[in-house]
Image (spheres, grey):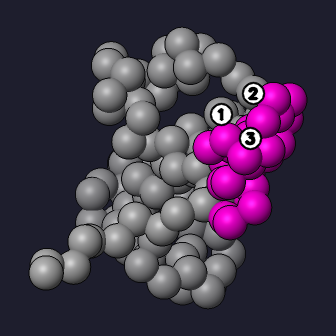
Amino acid sequence: MKKTYKEPIGRQGWKRSWATACRKAGLENFRFHDLRHTFVTRKVRQGWDDKRIMAITGHKTFAVFQRYNNPTEEDLREVVTTFSLPRQNGTVGKLLANGFPRTEKASAK
């Protein structure tokens, strides 16, 4: 028999339902808020303009919006390869030849 609720499930009920759904889906360390990051990243990847995405997500500043866009190395590679390359020995050519640099802390000498 399906439960019906006459009252809103409340904060604890929501948390319990979310935890149950994540467990059943095999997701670990996944927050509901992570869906916002996923939405922004996927819409940018699909070519939606920033202003339209920001209107939907409620981001007021571009700086905050950028924190939600999480491009992968493949996303960056795709953007770079769509441009014509005037010089293969320039920065773009080096990125394509050597891969994208990893951000690492410089070692102290």
Percent position of residue 19, x then y: 44, 76
Percent position of residue 31, x then y: 41, 65
Q: Amino acid at mark 1?
A: Val
| Nearest to N terminus: mark 1 or mark 3 | 1
Residue 65 in view of the camera = yes
Disc 1 and disc 2: Cα gap in Å?
5 Å
Pointer 3: residues within 10 angstroms few (<14), some, or many (20+)?
some
Q: Quadrant of residue 104?
A: bottom left
> Which region is colored magenta?
74-99
Pointer 2: residues within 10 angstroms few (<14), some, or many (20+)?
few
Question: On residue 47, which mark appears?
Answer: 2
Residue at 26% x, 71% y is 105
Q: Which residue is mark 1?
A: 44
Residue 42 in view of the camera = no
- Is 57 situated above or below 32? above
Q: Which residue is mark 3?
A: 80
Q: How many marks?
A: 3
Callout 3–callout 2 Cβ contact below 8 Å? no
Residue at 48% x, 21% y is 54
- Is 56 situated above or below 1? above
Callout 1–callout 2 Cβ contact below 8 Å? yes
Query: Which residue appears farthest toward the left when viewing the image?
Result: 109
